[in-house]
């Protein structure tokens, strides 16, 4: 049910509008002045606002302007008893969705409200789809370190300053780079990513700067490099500590002169690119060892953002884990599972050598292999399949006291995660069936899967009722 707010200093108008809109099954709230209306907009979650223009205390146009700063996507329909074309144009320029005159025509009012709500829905859906396409997800967490990163992004993103993002693998450096681009003045232009560690040293220059046809044996046609592709936008050089020294020299020249030359070419090409870089290495040590240029380091390190290891912000794990639960369960089309207090504490005790990326994999594993509520025992049981995650000393001691040696032996008997997963799934289903005296319908309800799906699993694993 859509929630509407009416701001008008005439009681009769508010009552009439409210009666009409509530009859159409809208949830309606009203207020008689713009100051209180703005406060309600700030605190409430409205889908549309109908606002009078001529009011005491605060003019409707001023309410519209300030509301646009608070919630720019909130549709506003302006109302006036002295409406003119000029007034309607002014309201539209300031962000109003539409303008209607008093007394409002019933059909026009309802059509305008419906169209305004549709527009608000489309704006929201467009933003969601854009976020999915761009792979830019929210930076989760409220710890001091994460709050500082968010604040730095807000300050730095609108500028042209180069940023060096440091942190361990899987900590979220790429996400920080995406948000720097998303909140920059270049957000409508491309964000081009290059993983320097994944490209052989002999090909990195061609990848970055492009090449001319015939410049080397396999150059059968001209190739446009990443610098040119990112022109007008942002170039993200991930794992820049793995870039060859010759490529570093060319990147330095591109940053200094805003020009590049393709491999095998002579023509200088102007490029307008903002460069963001990331590394999991200590670049100062790399400089000492002769593996990285100091002048390039200083060019890139105008602003430094360090992304902390997950173990340095364990208070953020519940928020991140809940987000992963909802997202992954949504992708699988299943009800969102829960993690109880003991399970969450067990997650926070793990060392997370793979950082946030490992936490995502762990949550997916728990969703697949655990019951409706994920417990401490589930976390213990599935924390180390195939030797992927090493459990910290305290957790290891807890597991040992619960028969951890046999658990470790079980893990060692599997060469890959899929084999372990099939084994665990088979044993889990077998246990539940025997517990319910092989009542398939009851078991399916208990483990929250369809009965036909459970029959398929029984057949897949060759499970049979004991004679």
Image (cartoon, grey):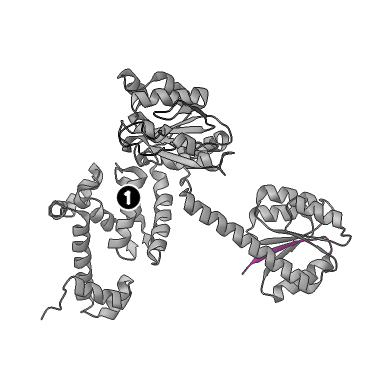
Instruction: Kindly give the residue lying farthest to the left in the view shown.
Output: 467
Q: Residue drawn 42% across and 25% down?
A: 250
Asked whether, in this view, residue 434 is left or right of residue 143, the answer is left
Residue 115 drawn at (x, y percent): 68, 66
Q: Is residue 375 visible?
A: no
Point out the image quarter for the C terminus: bottom left
- Quadrant of res 453: bottom left
- Quadrant of res 100: bottom right
Q: Say few, some or many: other residues with alpha carbon within 10 Å of mark 1 (under 14 / 14 to 19 / 20 or more).
A: many
Residue 193 to residue 258: above or below: below
Residue 79 drawn at (x, y percent): 81, 61
Judge by depth and name the residue closer to the eye, 40 or 106: 106
Give the magenta range. 1-10
- Quadrant of res 336: bottom left
Q: Residue drawn 40% across and 22% down?
A: 249
Residue 120 drawn at (x, y percent): 64, 60
Q: Disc 1 marks which residue? A: 347
Residue 2 drawn at (x, y percent): 63, 67
Q: Residue drawn 40% across and 61% down?
A: 331
Asked whether, in this view, residue 59 is left or right of residue 26, the answer is right
Decide whether residue 202 is among the magenta residues.
no
């Amino acid at each position: 049910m859509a929630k509407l707010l009416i701001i008008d200093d005439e009681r009769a108008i508010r009552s009439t509008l409210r009666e009409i809109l509530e009859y159409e099954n809208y949830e309606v709230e009203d207020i008689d002045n713009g100051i209180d209306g703005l406060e309600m907009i700030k605190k409430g979650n409205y889908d549309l606002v109908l606002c009078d223009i001529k009011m005491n205390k605060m003019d409707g146009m001023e309410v519209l302007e300030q509301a646009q700063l608070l919630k720019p996507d909130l549709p506003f329909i302006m109302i006036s008893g002295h409406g003119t074309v000029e007034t309607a144009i002014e309201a539209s320029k300031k962000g109003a969705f539409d303008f209607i005159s008093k007394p409002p025509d019933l059909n026009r009012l309802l059509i305008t409200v419906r169209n305004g709500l549709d527009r608000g829905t489309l704006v929201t859906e467009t933003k969601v789809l854009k976020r999915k396409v761009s792979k830019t997800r929210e930076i989760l967490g409220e710890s001091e370190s994460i709050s500082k990163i968010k604040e730095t992004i807000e300050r730095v993103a609108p500028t042209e300053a180069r940023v060096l993002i440091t942190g361990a693998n899987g900590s979220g450096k790429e996400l920080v780079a995406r948000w720097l681009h998303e909140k920059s003045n270049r957000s409508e232009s491309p964000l081009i990513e290059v993983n320097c560690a994944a490209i052989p040293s002999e090909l990195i220059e061609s990848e970055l700067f492009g090449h001319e046809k015939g410049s080397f044996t396999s150059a059968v046609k001209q190739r446009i490099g990443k610098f040119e592709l990112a022109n007008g936008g942002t170039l993200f050089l991930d794992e820049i500590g793995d870039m060859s020294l010759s490529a570093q020299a060319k990147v330095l020249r591109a940053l200094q002169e805003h020009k590049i030359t393709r491999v095998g070419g002579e023509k200088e090409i102007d490029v307008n690119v903002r460069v963001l870089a990331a590394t999991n290495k200590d670049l100062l040590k790399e400089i000492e060892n002769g593996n990285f240029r100091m002048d390039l380091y200083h060019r890139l390190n105008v602003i430094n953002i360090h992304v902390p290891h997950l173990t340095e912000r364990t208070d953020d794990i519940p928020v991140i884990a809940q987000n992963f639960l909802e997202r992954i369960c949504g992708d699988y089309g299943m009800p969102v599972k829960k993690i109880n207090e003991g399970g969450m504490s067990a997650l926070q005790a793990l060392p997370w050598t793979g950082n946030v990326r490992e936490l995502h994999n762990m949550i997916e594993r728990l969703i697949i292999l655990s019951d409706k509520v994920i417990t401490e025992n589930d976390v213990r049981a599935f924390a180390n399949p195939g030797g992927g995650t090493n459990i910290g000393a305290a957790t290891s001691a807890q597991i040992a006291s619960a028969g951890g040696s046999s658990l470790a032996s079980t893990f060692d008997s599997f060469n890959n995660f899929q084999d372990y997963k099939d084994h665990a799934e088979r044993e889990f289903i077998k246990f539940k069936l025997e517990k319910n005296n092989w009542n398939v319908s009851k078991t399916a309800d208990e483990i929250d899967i369809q009965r036909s799906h459970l029959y398929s699993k029984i057949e897949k694993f060759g499970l049979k009722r004991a004679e």
